[in-house]
Amino acid sequence: LKPHERMQGRDISDLYLENRSKENGKTALENEPWREEFFYEFDFFDEMFIPSSKALVRKKWKYIYWPHKKLEQLFNLEDDPMEFTSVFEDPKNAAIADEMRSRMYELKGEIEEPEDQRLECSGGNWSVNPPDEME
């Protein structure tokens, strides 16, 4: 199947198949290594149930920004894989937090869609506990 023109990502078969290039004999991963980080953004209109967030995730670190709370978190995923304790406030992590915040906004800018091309998302009550009249 051909992916939708707005679909991002990569064919994951590169991780488990050799997919050797006919030009240079290298595998797809040798020609284009797998990414070391990813950005995600979750915007939702019902902040009471699912708060919006933006994040940059790497093997060791995860930086999260919660826009409606104006809260930043930083997790060391090697020491705290379940993300129980943010280390954002620790001064020794200031440089990594600053760098990850900058990189997150850089990646966000690369994928930002023009206002006139955004997909519509409308209708429905997405609350965990919808009002009785909706039943």
Image (cartoon, rainbow, N blue to C red):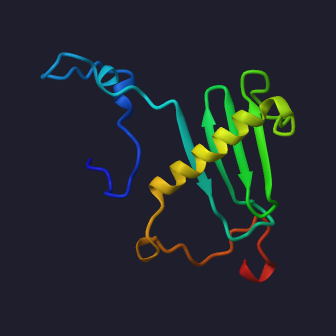
Front residue of this view, candidates 127 and 14: 14
Q: In which quarter of the image is the C terminus?
A: bottom right
User: Residue 111, relative to residue 122: is it above or below?
Assistant: above
- Residue 129: x and y in percent read 80, 67
Residue drawn where x is 46% and y is 71% of the image? 118
In the picture as drawn, the residue positioned furthest to the left comes out as: 23
User: Residue 112, relative to residue 21: is it above or below?
Assistant: below
In the picture as drawn, the residue positioned furthest to the bottom comes out as: 133
Residue drawn where x is 31% and y is 57% of the image? 5
Front residue of this view, candidates 132 and 6: 6
- Residue 106: x and y in percent read 53, 50
Asked if residue 127 lies left or right of residue 99, the reply is right
User: Residue 29, relative to residue 121: is it above or below?
Assistant: above
Asked if residue 85 lies left or right of residue 99, the reply is right
- Residue 21: x and y in percent read 19, 23
Q: Which corner quadrant of the image does residue 130 belong to?
A: bottom right
- Residue 83: x and y in percent read 79, 34
User: Residue 129, relative to residue 57: is it above or below?
Assistant: below
Report the label total.
Answer: 0
Residue drawn where x is 25% and y is 23% of the image? 19
Asked if residue 111 lies left or right of residue 100, the reply is left
Q: Which corner quadrant of the image does residue 91 belong to?
A: top right
